[in-house]
Amino acid sequence: MSATNRQIRLAARPVGEVKPGDWEHATAPVEEPGEGQFAGRTRFISLDPAMRGWLDDRPSYLPPVGLGEVMRAGSVIEVTASNHPGYQPGDHVVGTFGVQEHVVSDGKGALKIDTALAPASTYLGALGMPGMTAYFGLLDVGALKEGETVVVSGAAGAVGSIVGQIAKVKGCRVVGIAGGAEKCALLTDELGFDAAIDYRAGDVKRALREQTPDGIDVYFDNVGGEILDAALTRLAMHARVVICGAISQYNNETAVSGPSNYLTLLVRRARMEGFVVFDYAKRYAEAARDIAGWIGEGRLKVKEHVVKGTVDDFPETLQMLFRGENVGKLVLELA
């Protein structure tokens, strides 16, 4: 085991886009596991848009990452030593272990995973938080019904790509909104979406009119801003708008831009509801069973964007999310 533990800590609260100086590249001693603990080496680190919100000191569904603290992140570790009856060297474990090379844990909030059933990285994506988010956001919050029209923004991302595929499994027409011809082709040619709209190529509102002639029954929003506003103009009667995220707004230095077309909710007797996936924790096993089944049947394709590097590559890799460079779930694999 290495004598030092490389870590990424939060050095300053970002203003607007996260900058290199907002991070501290730190070193700490490698700890040995105490009684009831296990030690592990980090293999994969999850990168998620929600991370940007965790850096701001303001009320949210989780407390902000503290200045000087190791950056919060979901990761998969390989157990290297154990004084815990539930874990043995060689086990793979998923949990919120942070951006660091080495971990000591008592197992709380951790889950042992089976890499024979799916690659370790998939437990951070389709079988992890993004998959759970897509499943409960669409089926519970969105109250999806067979035959409806679903539109999802950020459709080539970790959550959006799964939302669209679950909607297809459930017998719906699915339109994805993504940035660039390559991502749009992926949605229709590989993931089975009925149509894709390239928000960089022109008038999103016009494209939505063309692709949703009967209106939108469920709009699953990952981006906020102008695209949310455009989708609100196309709502069908009793539509559901699922607020999952707003990546277009996360780096704003001014107030978040709210929807100006919200009165469509009144006219269409529609509802707009936000949710946090942690509220469904007791039902994760249910979602994982369904998603794993659809993957096994070939009805749901897993898209992962794996960057190989070191802990020190985390800050730059995170920026890929906000530049729209990832396709599917973004993961940093440690060498």
Image (tube, grey):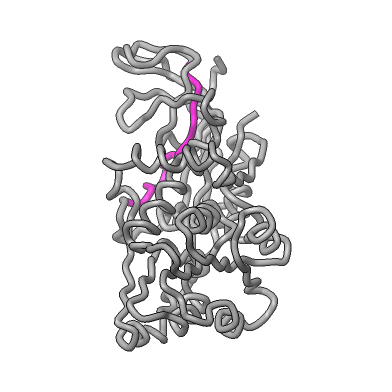
Q: Classify residue 181 by image quadrant.
A: bottom right
Residue located 42% across and 42% down the image: 290
Q: The C terminus appears in which quarter of the rendering?
A: top right
- 70 in magenta: yes
- The answer to whether one can see residue 129 in this image is yes
| Picture coordinates of residue 38, whole percent (x, y) | 39, 17
Residue located 40% across and 37% down the image: 289
Residue 243 is left or right of residue 46, and the answer is left
Q: Classify residue 121 by image quadrant.
A: top right
Q: The N terminus appears in which quarter of the rendering?
A: top right
Residue located 56% across and 83% down the image: 209
Residue 23 is left or right of residue 148, and the answer is right
Return the residue nearer the eye: 250 or 182: 182
The number of discs equals 0
Instruction: Give, as a single range, the part of the protein colored magenta.
Output: 63-79
- The answer to whether one can see residue 73 in this image is no
- 175 in magenta: no
Residue located 47% across and 38% down the image: 293
Return the residue nearer the eye: 24 or 88: 88
| Picture coordinates of residue 229, whole percent (x, y) | 47, 80
Q: What kind of secondary structure does the magenta stretch mostly adopt?
A: loop
| Picture coordinates of residue 225, whole percent (x, y) | 48, 75
Vertical side of 133 occupied by 152: above or below: below
Return the residue nearer the eye: 168 or 206: 168
Vertical side of 211 occupied by 278: above or below: above
Vertical side of 317 occupied by 285: above or below: above
Q: Classify residue 69 by image quadrant.
A: top left
